Structures are given as C-alpha cells and as structure tokens.
Amino acid sequence: MRVLINANRKLIMKFKESDKVEFKKSTAELKQAMEDLCAFGNNGEGTIYFGITVKGKVVGQEVSDSTL
C-alpha cells in the first residue's frame, strides 16, 4: 500500500494486489475468495480485502446479515 496526499490535502491510498494480497469488490465474490484462501494456505500466508476493486480502488462493502 502506498499513501499519497493530493493537491487538496486529501489522503489517497493506493493498493496493489500481489502473491500475498487479493482484492474482492464485494462478498458476491466469496466463492473465489475461498479458493484464494486455500491457495494462501498452501503457500503459507496471504490476505483478502473486500470492498476494493482489482485495480485498487476502495469502493467499500455494505455488511449485513445477508452478506455474511
């Protein structure tokens, strides 16, 4: 993750996927996330973040009983 400050003094975080970091836009991608978790388990470690697009844009994730 890179942290930048733009001309308006707003904090911008730049995220990037790697062999140990995966992004999922929403929990609708839960099946793929579970497969990624298995792969991380085989390789030793990794983290999955929900609410971030593949390009690293933070879009957030609504969480309710139906999304868990």
Image: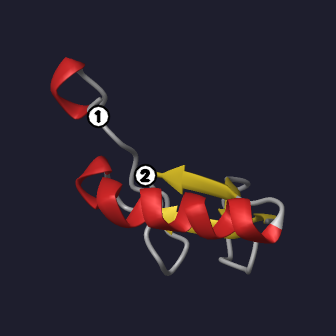
Name the residue carrying label 1.
62
**In front: 33, or 55?**
33
The label on residue 49 is none
Image vertical order of residue 67 relative to residue 57, above or below? above
Quadrant in which the N terminus appears: bottom right
Residue 7 locus on image (x, y percent): 71, 68
Mark 1 Cα shell of 10 Å, populated few (<14), some (14-19), many (≥20): few
Q: Is residue 14 visible?
A: no
Residue at horizontal 59%, vertical 56%?
Answer: 48
Q: Quadrant of residue 20?
A: bottom right
Which three-letter amino acid code belongs to the residue tagged 2?
Gly
**In front: 39, or 19?**
39
Q: Is residue 44 visible?
A: yes
**In front: 61, or 34?**
34
Left or right position of 20 against 31: right
Mark 2 Cα shell of 10 Å, populated few (<14), some (14-19), many (≥20): some
- SS of the residue at dot 1? loop
Residue at horizontal 39%, vertical 55%?
Answer: 59
Residue at horizontal 29%, vertical 29%?
Answer: 68
Image vertical order of residue 55 relative to residue 35, above or below? below
**In front: 40, or 64?**
40
Q: Earlier in the sequence, mark 1 or mark 2?
A: 2
Left or right position of 58 against 11: left
Q: CA distance from mark 1 to mark 2?
A: 8 Å
The label on residue 51 is 2
Q: Which residue ends up furthest to the top in the rendered image? A: 65
Which three-letter amino acid code belongs to the residue tagged 1?
Glu
Residue 24 locus on image (x, y percent): 43, 62
Q: Which residue ends up furthest to the left in the rendered image? A: 66
Residue at horizontal 29%, vertical 34%?
Answer: 62
Q: Which residue ends up furthest to the front in the rendered image? A: 42
